[in-house]
């Protein structure tokens, strides 16, 4: 069964909304779906986190958050400040494999970008993706600055021999400016393939039924319903 790792070019790019959209699409097609958030940072006690948003938007209840820290920092830094043990990504990989055994799709949403550190040994989401042999879906933004951040993420994916599942713009503006419009062509050139989709800005504020309609219109034409990771193998992979 498939595992897809969802990362971003930074924080606030729309990873959680994209993850929810993928979960909703797969569930609507009858697939069994699980979502794993290895670590959530910057959430105070009693506040709702990313897994809650995924559950509410997608209607998928099979969501798992393995660690939560209150400081809005990288997981390793937030854990240190809280006096808590850092997250063991080998344990995360084991959890994902257990879920993978009887789900058609497991989505793993990282914290921040691909190379954010999770433990004192320097383990990153890229290491988890390599351990799981999972392709990486990159969520980026539209506008100035997105191309460099995306290019660096793609370089990291290629350098580590990972597969690229595609690029999604996570918050496509209602009135895109010149930079945003030109990103479509430029991002496709960087990835050497068409964009996997663009989710409208504000989609995470919609009610679940409307959200699923938006998810379908935004992602289904490119990703389809099969979620077969082999379709999206990176041209950069040796």
Image (tube, grey):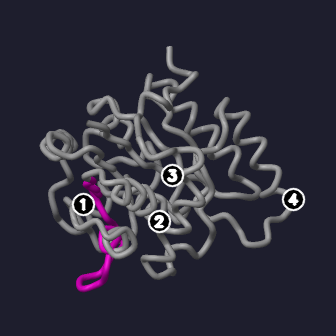
Q: Is residue 65 left or right of residue 56?
A: left
Question: Which of marks 2 and 3 precedes in the sequence?
Answer: 3
Place of residue 97 in the rendered image (x, y in percent of width and height, measured from the top left):
17, 39
Place of residue 8 in the rendered image (x, y in percent of width and height, measured from the top left):
51, 52
Cα distance, mark 3 to mark 1?
23 Å
**Along the line of sight, which residue is nearer the eye, 127 or 30?**
30
**As drawn, which residue projects farthest toward the top?**
238
Q: Helix, strand or loop at disc 2?
A: helix
Residue identifier under label 3: 8
> How crowded is the residue under tag 1: few (<14 C-alpha within 10 Å), some, or many (20+)?
some
Residue identifier under label 1: 80
Q: Using the image, tell me which numbered label, if any, was put on residue 17.
A: 2
What is the span of residues highlighted in magenta in the rendered image? 33-52
Q: Is residue 62 left or right of residue 192?
A: left
Q: Tell me which corner region of the image, top left, top right, bottom left or bottom right, holds residue 120.
A: top left
Q: Using the image, tell me which numbered label, if any, was put on residue 102.
A: none
Residue identifier under label 4: 178
**Along the line of sight, which residue is nearer the eye, 82 or 153?**
153
Say which residue appears at 57% left-offset and 22% top-offset: 235
Say which residue appears at 39% left-offset and 73% top-offset: 57
Q: Helix, strand or loop at disc 1?
A: helix
**Along the line of sight, which residue is nearer the eye, 226 or 17?**
226
Cα distance, mark 1 to mark 2?
28 Å
Say which residue appears at 22% left-offset and 69% top-offset: 82
């Amino acid at each position: 069964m498939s595992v897809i790792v969802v990362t971003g070019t930074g924080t606030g790019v729309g990873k959680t909304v994209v993850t929810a959209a993928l979960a909703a699409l797969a569930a609507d097609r009858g697939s069994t779906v699980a979502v794993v958030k290895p670590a959530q940072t910057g959430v105070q006690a009693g506040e709702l986190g990313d897994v809650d948003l995924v559950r509410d938007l997608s209607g998928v209840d099979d969501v798992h958050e393995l660690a939560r820290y209150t400081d809005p920092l990288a997981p390793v830094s937030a854990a240190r400040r809280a006096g808590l043990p850092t997250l063991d990504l080998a344990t995360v990989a084991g959890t994902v494999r257990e879920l993978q055994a009887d789900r058609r799709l497991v989505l793993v949403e990282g914290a921040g970008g691909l190379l954010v550190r999770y433990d004192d040994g320097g383990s990153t989401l890229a290491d988890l993706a390599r351990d799981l042999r999972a392709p990486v879906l990159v969520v980026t933004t539209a506008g100035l600055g997105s191309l460099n951040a995306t290019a660096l993420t793609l370089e990291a994916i290629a350098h580590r021999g990972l597969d690229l599942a595609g690029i999604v713009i996570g918050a496509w503006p209602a009135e895109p400016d010149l930079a945003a419009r030109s990103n479509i062509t430029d991002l496709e050139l960087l990835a050497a393939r068409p964009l996997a989709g663009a989710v409208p800005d504000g989609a995470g504020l919609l009610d679940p039924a409307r959200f699923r309609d938006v998810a379908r219109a935004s992602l289904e034409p490119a990703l389809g319903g099969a979620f077969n990771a082999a379709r999206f193998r990176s041209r950069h992979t040796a």
